[in-house]
Amino acid sequence: KQEVTQIPAALSVPEGENLVLNCSFTDSAIYNLQWFRQDPGKGLTSLLLIQSSQREQTSGRLNASLDKSSGRSTLYIAASQPGDSATYLCAVNSGGYQKVTFGIGTKLQVIP
Amino acid sequence: ETGVTQTPRHLVMGMTNKKSLKCEQHLGHNAMYWYKQSAKKPLELMFVYSLEERVENNSVPSRFSPECPNSSHLFLHLHTLQPEDSALYLCASSQMGNSPLHFGNGTRLTVT
């Protein structure tokens, strides 16, 4: 059974700092890995999706990497802004019909 | 409208009530999902519909009854719920295969 862990559970940083969020998973046989952002009381917004054959994906100030062999993914946020404050979730797709396992998330606060 | 739309945003119901949650997607996707999000727990997959057929039912109690009348609409019918069913219920859609999940903003359900 796939298990997904996100560390740290919460993170507080000053505005402008570069930061890294971590996601680890127990079964390396995955189809893809997706990073989401969730604002309080809202749904999930997809940030990046990395296919199992890829090593990284970039979108603006975000860069996600994937190392299947070690069961790890990182989300790098450059030059953080207060608007980046949210909970970031990692989701691992291990099978068809989107059998997706989510982590509990990292709650990020960027202080102005 | 674009994306995935869920109604209502908030719902308070007694344990003997019957209510329904509605989800509509405008993305042309062929798979739709119900997830449950409880505090400090990972998202739990409840049901998956692919081409309007239920293909996943993760041992969800029968007091939750899904319905998918067409590829754009998904309902979750609720009957005689328990207080522990209080949670954020999220609808998602995707193309079958390894494509990203797209989520609605969820329905915050409180069972009294």
Image (spheres, coloured by chain):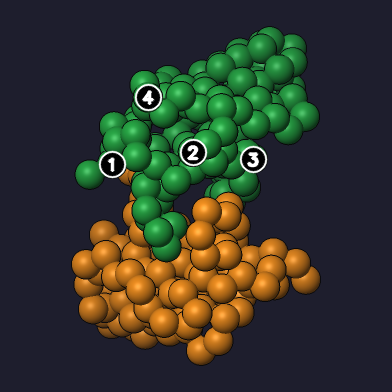
Chain colours: A green, B orange
Q: Are marks 1 and 3 in contact (CB under 8 Å)?
A: no
Residue at image x 55%, y 86%?
B70
Along the line of sight, which residue is nearer the eye, A73 or B74?
Answer: A73
**Mark 1 vs mark 2: in front:** 2
Work out whether mark 4 precedes mark 2 in sequence or the reverse, and give the earlier one: 2
Q: Residues within 10 Å of mark 1 (few under 14, many from 20)?
A: some
Report in which chain the residue with disc 4 lies: A
Residue B107 in percent (x, y) is at 51, 64
Residue B62 figure quarter: bottom left
Q: Is residue B15 left or right of residue B104?
A: left
Q: Is residue A9 left or right of residue B71?
A: left
Q: Which residue is mark 3?
A: A47
Q: Are marks 1 and 3 on the same chain?
A: yes
Measured along the vertical axis of the image, is residue A50 above or below residue B60?
Answer: above
Q: Are marks 1 and 4 on the same chain?
A: yes
Structural distance between the alpha carbons of marks 1 and 2: 15 Å
Q: In the displayed image of the protein, which residue is found farthest to the bottom? A: B69
Work out whether mark 1 precedes mark 3 in sequence or the reverse, and give the earlier one: 1
Residue type (three-letter) at the residue carrying disc 1: Gln
Q: Which mark is residue A110?
A: none
Residue type (three-letter) at the residue carrying disc 3: Leu
Residue B109 in percent (x, y) is at 43, 64
Q: Are marks 3 and 2 on the same chain?
A: yes
Work out whether mark 1 precedes mark 2 in sequence or the reverse, and give the earlier one: 1
Query: Tag 2's secondary structure?
Result: loop
Q: Are marks 1 and 4 in contact (CB under 8 Å)?
A: no
Residue A109 in percent (x, y) is at 59, 23
Q: Is residue A25 left or right of residue B68?
A: left
Structural distance between the alpha carbons of marks 1 and 3: 22 Å
Q: Which mark is residue A69?
A: 4
Report in which chain the residue with disc 3 lies: A
